[in-house]
Image: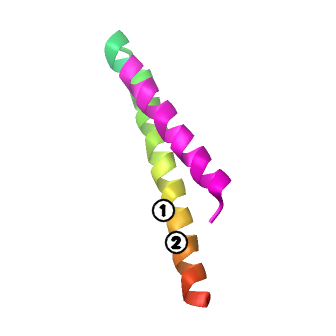
């Protein structure tokens, strides 16, 4: 597991949440959609890191 990869995914998730909230406040559907997309990308990154951890545990 890369701590840096996890931190990047967490930062992207936070960025996405902020962008989505700004889109809701301003009524901008593009910002909302991009924010949700960033959150989804962060979830995928976390899933990849979890899979890497599980594989490493099986090997060890």
Percent x, y of residue 7: 59, 47
The residue to which callout 2 is attached is 51
- Residue at 52%, 71% in the rendered image: 51
Furthest residue to the top? 26
Q: Nearer the viewer, residue 37 or 59?
A: 59
For numbered disc 2, what is the local secondary structure?
Answer: helix
Q: Of the numbered discs in the image, which one, if any, rests on residue 47?
A: 1
Could you tell me what secondary structure mostly forms the magenta stretch? helix
Q: Quick check: 14 above or below 54? A: above
Q: Residues within 10 Å of mark 2 (few under 14, many from 20)?
A: few
Q: Of the numbered discs in the image, which one, if any, rests on residue 9?
A: none
Which corner quadrant holds the C terminus? bottom right
Percent x, y of residue 57: 55, 83
Percent x, y of residue 28: 38, 16
Q: Nearer the viewer, residue 36 or 53?
A: 53
- Residue at 61%, 89% in the rendered image: 59
Percent x, y of residue 15: 51, 31
Find out whether residue 11 is within the magenta segment: yes
């Amino acid at each position: 597991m890369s701590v840096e990869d996890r931190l990047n995914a967490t930062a992207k998730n936070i960025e996405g949440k902020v962008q989505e909230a700004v889109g809701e406040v301003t009524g901008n559907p593009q910002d909302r959609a991009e924010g949700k997309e960033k959150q989804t990308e962060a979830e995928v990154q976390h899933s990849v890191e979890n899979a890497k951890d599980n594989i490493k545990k099986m090997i060890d």
